[in-house]
Image (cartoon, helix red, strand yellow):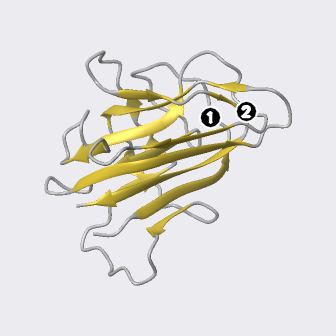
Amino acid sequence: MAKRVFSQATWTPTATADSTALANTTYMAIEAANAAQGLQVIEIYEGGQASASSINIMQFARSVTFGTTPTALAAPNGDGAMQSLTSALATVPVTYVAASTGPLRSSISGNARLNLSFNAFGGIVRWVAAPGEEWGIIGITASISGSTLSAFTGGSAGLMGGHIVYEPF
């Protein structure tokens, strides 16, 4: 399969407690489209766009509940193949930044989460998985088949942009 990039050009995350529905355009959500689909997250990038010092307490974490009726991405946000010669996928993974009800980040202590906090006043975070240590998403069961990049409680959320590089299998 070929690598894809899911991007949100500019957004302000909102500090949200675990197991609380995330508000539209304050997160990036990625989910497997069906029980047979798997995704490997290879890279997460966050770039600060705030005009003053602002600490974003960001986490990439499993979703305990999926978003309901995700809204299709619209420019300048997007999700597409990185290689121009890539064939169209039979089943496209679900990526979104808005839904009628947002996804819920898991509060289960046994579920993985990456802490990606940074100063949104020009700061950056780039997490890149070592080979064989990619973040796995598989099937359609909550807590293993969907993840979100969102702000945890605390801090003072500032404007940012980001992307998630992943590979369906």
Q: Residue furthest bottom?
A: 85
Amino acid under label 2? Gly
Badge 1: few (under 14), some or many (20 or more) residues near its Cα, within 10 Å? many
Of 134 and 18, which appears nearest the observer? 134
Name the element at disc 2.
loop
| Residue 80 vertical position relative to residue 165 in the rendered view, above or below | below
Amino acid beneath label 1: Pro
Apparent side of residue 165 relative to residue 133 in the rendered image (left or right)? right
Q: Position of residue 127 (x, y in %)?
A: 49, 41
The image quadrant of residue 113 is: top left
Which residue in the structure is indicated by mark 1?
A: 13
- Residue where numbered disc 2 is placed: 158
Q: Is residue 41 left or right of residue 9?
A: left
| First-in-chain label (1 vs 2) | 1
47 left or right, relative to 86: right
Q: How many marks?
A: 2
* Residue 82: percent from left, percent from top: 46, 70
Q: Position of residue 9 (x, y in %)?
A: 65, 55
Q: Residues within 10 Å of mark 2 (few under 14, many from 20)?
A: many
